[in-house]
Image (cartoon, rainbow, N blue to C red):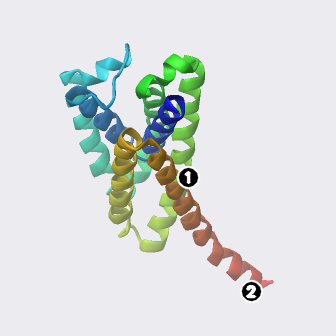
Amino acid sequence: MALLSGLATAFGLSSAAGVNAYLPLLVVALIARFTSLISLNEPWDVLTNWVVIGVLGVLFIIEIVADKIPVVDHVNDVIQSVLRPVAGAILFAAASGVVGHTHPVLAVTAGLLTAGSIHAIKATARPVVTATTGGTGNWLVSTLEDIWSFITAVFAILIPLLGVVLLAAGIFLLVLVWRRSRRPKRYVENQLR
């Protein structure tokens, strides 16, 4: 059961990183620093260093602001195409002892793929939001993404299996938005034939 719980934590944290790279890293750093809910082994225990926490805090604020502004959010998504999967890999590998049970390369790869997949869905859906709302809906969608990332990261640590449920729900919602955005085009194309 501990292995299953550890894997659920790792997948939950890396999926949260696919939406916001620095928020789950900051959550893990602060929870590991101030509680015993998560224990980070070397070299991941560096996340609890005050300098690292400060840098994560600044990067988190920059990402939150950049992700709320139309056009800037698309540039941010391009930059985050590298950073979010890396954050996911770090979180997967660092998550509560999974590395002790899983080969480190497998753990890092799983984190990269999980966060990268979530980021790809997010980056694909965001231009649709911009196009359908003229950019006015970006701040709301971004705020909801940040809330989802925070809740998923916290639940991945506190109630790991619920974190997996949130991951599935988030993926479902992102795919639903993407599919709905494509539906009007298909309808118009079919009407023109």
- Cα distance in 3D space between marks 1 and 2: 28 Å
Q: Amino acid at mark 2?
A: Gln
Q: Check the image and name the residue furthest to the right.
A: 193
Q: Which residue is mark 1?
A: 121
Could you classify mark 2 by the number of other residues whose Cα lies within 10 Å: few (under 14), some (14-19), or many (20 or more)? few
Decide if residue 64 is in sight here.
yes
Q: Which mark is residue 14?
A: none
Q: Which image quadrant for residue 192?
A: bottom right
Q: Which residue is mark 2?
A: 191
Task: Look at 32% across and 41% down and name the residue there.
Answer: 23
Q: Nearer the viewer, residue 142 or 13?
A: 13
Q: Amino acid at mark 1?
A: Ile
Q: Is residue 174 left or right of residue 68?
A: right
Query: Marks 2 and 1: in contact by CB < 8 Å?
Result: no
Task: Determine the secondary structure under disc 1.
Answer: helix
Whichever of labels 1 and 2 marks the residue nearer the N terminus, that label is 1
Q: Position of residue 138 (x, y in %)?
A: 37, 63
Q: Is residue 188 left or right of residue 47?
A: right
